[in-house]
Amino acid sequence: MDPRRGSRLRLIAVLVLVSAAVVGLAPAAAARAKPPRRLPPPAIVAEATVPSVAVYAAPGATTSTSALANPNRYRGKLVLLVTAVRLDGWLQVLLPVRPNGTTGWIHAGDVVLSNDPYRITVQLTAHRITVTKQGRVFLREPVAVGKANTPTPGGGYYLTQLFSPPDPNGPYGPYAYSLSGYSEVLTTFQGGDAIIGLHGTNHPELLGHDVSSGCIRMRNDAITKLAAVLPLGTPVTIVA
């Protein structure tokens, strides 16, 4: 037999084997393909449309247990983070009251609802804040948090109000958010309630340390970036 013909036959056989191997691997490779990325559901924020929002202990209750004023104590709009929705017109919401984490039920007719794609996570030990939009990182920054005797309390909260301090170069920077949570050590702070805040700072060298009375401090340009986009009602989760 012609040696060249034998070489061609051997080459064809090798190609057939390689093709068969590739075809055989195709299903396995397809099986290992990553599933489509699932986006987290947006948060649901309720904005009050009445002068006072009645709060009930349970859906269907006829007597309210408390009421929230609109505008709020800062003369701003009252917003609440919705934690559950019922088809019969009741909403469970996170309340901006003590103790931290208190929830109540309100009538859906007293508010208008909107979706919020942002979420904030604060890691106390890592001294880091991460803000995501539809599950993707929008901002990640170092922060300063509470001292050992005035710790930043862990838990779930939301942004209740945005302020522009009179001195943008002062201790609160150009912007400050109040949270729905409170210090669990202090009952008052500088003449008011000891509400947890998220704000800028005039001492960026202290970021990454436990130095505050419970508030979360970050760089001024970072809080300015957040103030331009974050709506009130954005969920804030503070973890160890």
Image: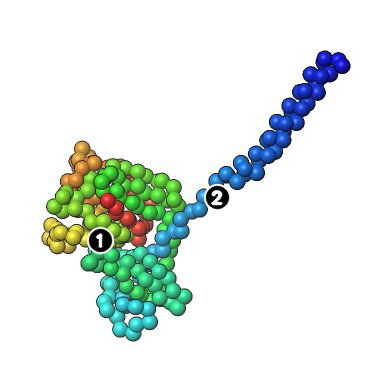
Q: Position of residue 221 (x, y in %)?
A: 30, 42
Q: Which mark is residue 181?
A: 1
Task: Give yes or no for contact between labels 1 and 2 (Cβ–Cβ under 8 Å).
Answer: no
Element type at mark 1: strand
Q: Residue at x 19, y 50 (%)?
A: 146
Colour scheme used in the picture? Answer: rainbow
In the rendered structure, the answer to whether residue 214 lies left or right of residue 64 reads left
Q: Earlier in the sequence, mark 1 or mark 2?
A: 2
Bin the neighbour count of mark 1 within 10 Å (Cα to Cα): few under 14, some 14-19, many 20 and up: many
- Residue at far front of view: 1
Q: Is residue 181 visible?
A: yes
The quadrant where residue 58 appears: bottom left
In the rendered structure, the answer to whether residue 21 lies left or right of residue 132 reads right
Q: Is residue 51 visible?
A: no
User: Can you tell which of label 1 and label 2 is closer to the viewer?
Assistant: 2
Q: CA distance from mark 1 to mark 2?
A: 36 Å
Element type at mark 2: loop
Residue type, mark 2 in image: Pro
Residue situated in front as seen by the camera: 40 or 234: 40
Does residue 83 sit above or below 28 in this rendering?
Answer: below
Residue identified by numbered label 2: 36
- Residue at far right of view: 1
Q: Residue at x 32, y 55 (%)?
A: 237
The quadrant where residue 107 appears: bottom left
Q: Residue at x 65, y 44 (%)?
A: 27
Q: Position of residue 197 (x, y in %)?
A: 24, 55
- Residue at far bottom of view: 62
Q: Position of residue 181 (x, y in %)?
A: 25, 61
Residue type, mark 1 in image: Gly
Q: Residue at x 41, y 63 (%)?
A: 44
Q: Position of residue 29 (x, y in %)?
A: 61, 41
